[in-house]
Amino acid sequence: MRRCEKCRRALPQGSIYYRLNISLLQGFDGVLNEADGTSIKDFISRINEQTVGVPESLLEEEVHREFAFILCSRCKEKYCANPLDLPLTGNSIPKKLSDLQE
Ligand SMILES: [Zn+2]
């Protein structure tokens, strides 16, 4: 049976579920620090030195990763509320109702 990949809740036939597809791509703004004496040629040769002997599949993972998950409705809501799992500072839940009446 299909299950939520976050909470493991069973998702029987006919139930609503969500597909979460994450595509993570490396960005590069094209700016080289030429003030440091870095030319395109230096830059490329440095990359070539750093990647000698590294399997192609690992290099590919460095620039592009794909993730796919099945989520139940509850886990989808939690994910959408905070997709980057940021700390919830400033939105803390008051311990007592009286804390609200300041
Ligand atoms: Zn779930």
Image (cartoon, rainbow, N blue to C red):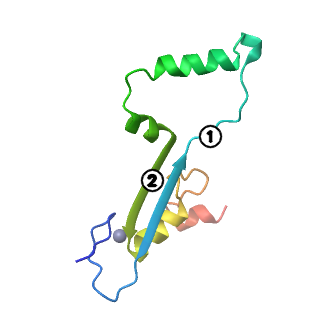
Q: Which mark is residue 98?
A: none
Q: Tell me what residue is drawn at x 37 percent, y 69 percent.
A: 70
What amino acid is found at the position of numbered circle 1 in the picture? Gly
Say which of 86 and 5 sits in front: 5
Residue 39 visible, this orientation: yes
The circle on residue 27 is 1
Establish if 43 lies above or below 20. Answer: above
Q: Amino acid at mark 2?
A: Glu
Rendering coords of residue 50 (x, y %): 47, 19
The residue lying at 70 percent from left, 35 percent from top is 29
Residue plotted at (71% across, 16% down): 39
Q: Which residue is mark 2?
A: 66
Label 1 beta carbon less than 8 Å to ligand 1: no
Q: Residue furthest bottom?
A: 14
Image quarter of the C terminus: bottom right
Quadrant containing ligand 1: bottom left
Q: CA distance from mark 2 to mark 1?
A: 15 Å
* Viewer-nearest residue: 44 or 69: 44
Residue 69 drawn at (x, y percent): 38, 64
Of residues 39 and 65, the one drawn nearer to the viewer in this rendering: 39
Are the two marked residues, 2 and 1, in contact with CB atoms closer than 8 angstroms? no
**Helix, strand or loop status at disc 1:** loop
**First-in-chain label (2 vs 1):** 1
47 sits left or right of 42 in the view: left
- Quarter of the image where the N terminus is located: bottom left
Percent x, y for residue 67? 42, 56
Q: Is the residue marked by circle 1 packed among few (<14), some (14-19), or many (20+) residues within 10 Å?
A: few
